[in-house]
Amino acid sequence: QGELVQSRGGLAQPGGSLRLSCTATTQIFRVYSMAWYRQAPGKERELVAIIQRDGRTVIEDVVKGRFTASRDNAKNMVYLQMNTLKREDTAVYYCNAGLLEFGNYRALDFWGQGAQVTVSP
């Protein structure tokens, strides 16, 4: 089992909702910021959300207003709540642990196993 373990993804209709979760080891969770990325077929992996150690979040413009991110310090878990899903949200979603450096997130080589999210009528 790796340092980051994700829940399964799922299938949703356009306009629907899904929630992803990711459990980290205590050491990872205490030291690093966390983030969610996604990778659609034929596209590069893109950053979706950052969850800082103090719980503050940064949501990327591409999903702002529809997705939220959070963390549960008691459970060493982070979440990605996805609402008003669109077909273009279809991708494999990954959680990551990394560092915030001068306001920029730098992903470290701690990745969840990925979760397929499919949005289709």
Image: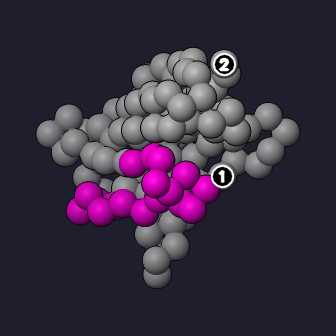
Residue 74 placement (x, y as % from top left)? 14, 39
- Quarter of the picture containing the N terminus is top left
Q: Is residue 70 left or right of residue 80?
A: left
Q: Which residues are magenta?
A: 52-68
Of 40 and 52, the residue lying toward us: 40
- Which residue type carries mark 2? Pro
Q: Is residue 39 left or right of residue 48?
A: right
Q: Secondary structure at mark 1?
A: strand
Residue 89 placement (x, y as % from top left)? 64, 38
- Which residue type carries mark 1? Glu
Residue labelled with disc 1: 46
What residue sits 85% from the left and 39% below the top? 42
The first of marks 1 and 2 along the sequence is: 1
The image's mark for residue 121 is 2
Considering only vertical position in the picture, is 2 above or below 39?
A: above
What residue sits 46% from the left and 77% below the top? 103
- Quarter of the picture containing the C terminus is top right
The residue sitting at the bottom extreme is 102
The image's mark for residue 96 is none
The residue sitting at the left extreme is 74
Q: Is residue 36 left or right of residue 70?
A: right
- Main secondary structure of the magenta stretch: loop
